[in-house]
Amino acid sequence: MDLNAIAFQLILGIASAMLYWIVSSGLTFTFGVTRVLNFAHGAFYMLGAYFTLSFFALTQNYLLSLFLGAVIVALIGAGCERGLISRIYGLPIPFQLILTFGLVLLFDDLVRIFWGSVPKMMPAQFIGSINVFGRILPVFSLYLIFAGVAIALVLYFLLSKTDWGVEIRAITVDPETAMCSGLNPAFLYATAFMFGSFLAGLGGGLYLPISSASPGMGEHIIIYAFIVTVIGGLGSIKGAFVSALIIGIIESLGALFVPWMTIALPYIALSAVLLVRPEGIFGEE
Amino acid sequence: MSSILTLSDVNSYYGKSHILFGISLEVKESEVVVLLGRNGVGKTTTLKTIMGLVPKITGKILFKDGIDLLKIPPYKKAKLGIGYVPDHGGIFPNLTVYQNMKISIKQSQSKSESTQIFELKDVFNLFPQLEHMTNRLAGTLSGGERRMLGIARGLLLNPELLIIDEPSEGLAPNIVQDIIEVIKKIRSSGVSVLVADQNLPFVEKIADRVYVIDKGEIKMSGELSELSREELEMFLTF
Ligand SMILES: Nc1ncnc2c1ncn2[C@@H]1O[C@H](COP(=O)(O)OP(=O)(O)OP(=O)(O)O)[C@@H](O)[C@H]1O
Ligand SMILES: [Mg+2]
């Protein structure tokens, strides 16, 4: 086993970590603000992939389609929040589970109706590869890493430097005081949900160049997003970034050292963190 | 003097528990009114009722010349001219002192009338210590500094009525003295103040009038000098 192989595997791990990060960041952000655990986040991820496909068919421009797809998903998310999810704020978790799981089933079937059941692909993007540590690294991995870091920076900027972000953090920590300071909770919750859905949609479109879109594709990623979110601490964005990196890296290094148990590694990590720190790495309490 | 706030026969409930029983009170222009009562008698609930933060309320609550506060959602009350400083301070610990104040400033900037009385510099005049900590996280402030930031945030809304819950609670005597001075200055700038408190020596220094509350009912009201000492102490001791 040489060091080059480990370093190379590390890069691949960071690349897949970035996909987990992008999807979990939206999930944990929405939860942090609204205290609703959105199982439909995976469905938004799937919708992001399908809308990106459809926009690509129209424009032949991948990055533009990716953005437009995420915008449409953001609007769908805002619609769901205003029409349905805002009605269950403050109710016990089972209500959230039933409602958002209902949305998963609804969107899965809508996708079958509009796009069909057969998996769909788009022409490969970011083809080509570069030589790293004597191995062939697909350019796509670099694109994922770039996208993940860019989204982290945008999130940091939004939440610490814009009025909207500061107001979101205010209502997250003390809704009553925020309201009495004139902040409109309906607006902030709806826009937070919209932004979380945007990130989900972006995740779906980002992975499209090397995978296909299919109904139910959100279920696999949502499990990872939940693992990442719980390890990082529910509601913690920093936690989601760190724990996505942990999961991505132990998976890729696991593939090198213990290939027979790679699939189990995220769950083992989850169990270990829950045993030592049930609130997650950056969780409160 | 015209009336800023009027409560008539107000009842409040948390679920099935009936907390306030037929509360009636009035705050007039440029007046400091104190809701006086010991722990658990319904002071905070009365203030929250005015802000619309209690699930079930009956009766009448009017602001200025007839604005029905029961029909207005809490988040619109800041713009209407009501500032509220809750008992836990009313600050956001995860934001800097400046960000805390900025949220209030933005509300009063978008107000229709341009009669801004309290700007950042006025607030720094009242609370000089805050000026040097604008970049600190509000969660790292001491109890007294938090209270000052909370009141500063309320003032920056440029309210016509400022409501403060237990401003003297848990503070050292010299800081209580500062708060007394601040409340007097707020009053002389023409803002009406409604305070809930149980510390009689403090209340004596600020109140134009008091309402004594016990078990969710107003038992006495008037200028402190007019009220019988024995009765007052009976309502304030356990
Ligand atoms: N959210 C709530 N749900 C149920 N009951 C409540 C709630 N908040 C307050 N109460 C009850 O209402 C009554 C009045 O409480 P309130 O907080 O208004 O008293 P207070 O006069 O402000 O007391 P303190 O001086 O301790 O702040 C108490 O019996 C309290 O237990
Ligand atoms: Mg109280």
Image (cartoon, rainbow, N blue to C red):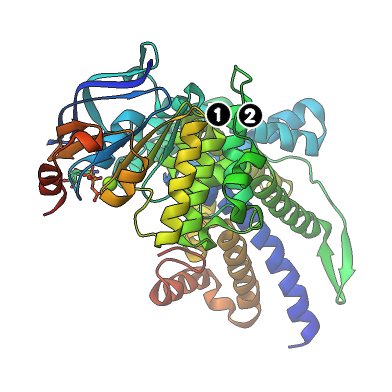
Q: Where residue A61 appears, x then y in whole percent?
A: 82, 34
Q: Are marks 2 and 1 on the same chain?
A: yes
Badge 1, how many Cα within 10 Å: few under 14, some, many 20+? some
Q: CA distance from mark 2 to mark 1?
A: 6 Å
- Vertical order, A224 against B236 (above or below): below
Q: Is residue A45 left or right of residue A234?
A: right
Q: Where residue B191 appears, x then y in whole percent?
A: 47, 29
Residue contact between numbered discs 2 and 1, judged by CB atoms under 8 Å: yes
* Residue at the top extreme of this rendering: B66
Q: Where residue B182 appears, x then y in whole percent?
A: 49, 44
Disc 2 is placed on an element classified as helix
- Look at label 2 and name its amino acid: Ile
Residue nearest the observer in this picture, A236 or A216 = A236
Q: Is residue B187 left or right of residue A71?
A: left
Q: Where residue A217 appears, x then y in whole percent?
A: 55, 46
Q: Is residue A100 left or right of residue B37?
A: right
- Vertical order, A217 against A152 (above or below): above
Disc 1 is placed on an element classified as helix
Residue nearest the observer in this picture, A193 or B204 = B204
Q: Quadrant of the N terminus of chain A?
A: bottom right
Judging from the image, mark 2 belongs to the subunit labelled A
Badge 2, how many Cα within 10 Å: few under 14, some, many 20+? many
Q: Which residue is painted at 17% across and 43% down in the image? A: B41
Residue A200 appears in view: no
Q: Is mark 1 within 8 Å of ligand 1?
A: no
Residue A76, label in figure:
1
Residue A72, label in figure:
2
Residue nearest the observer in this picture, B63 or A31 = B63
Q: Which residue is painted at 57% across and 60% down in the image? A: A240
- Look at label 1 and name its amino acid: Ile
Judging from the image, mark 1 belongs to the subunit labelled A
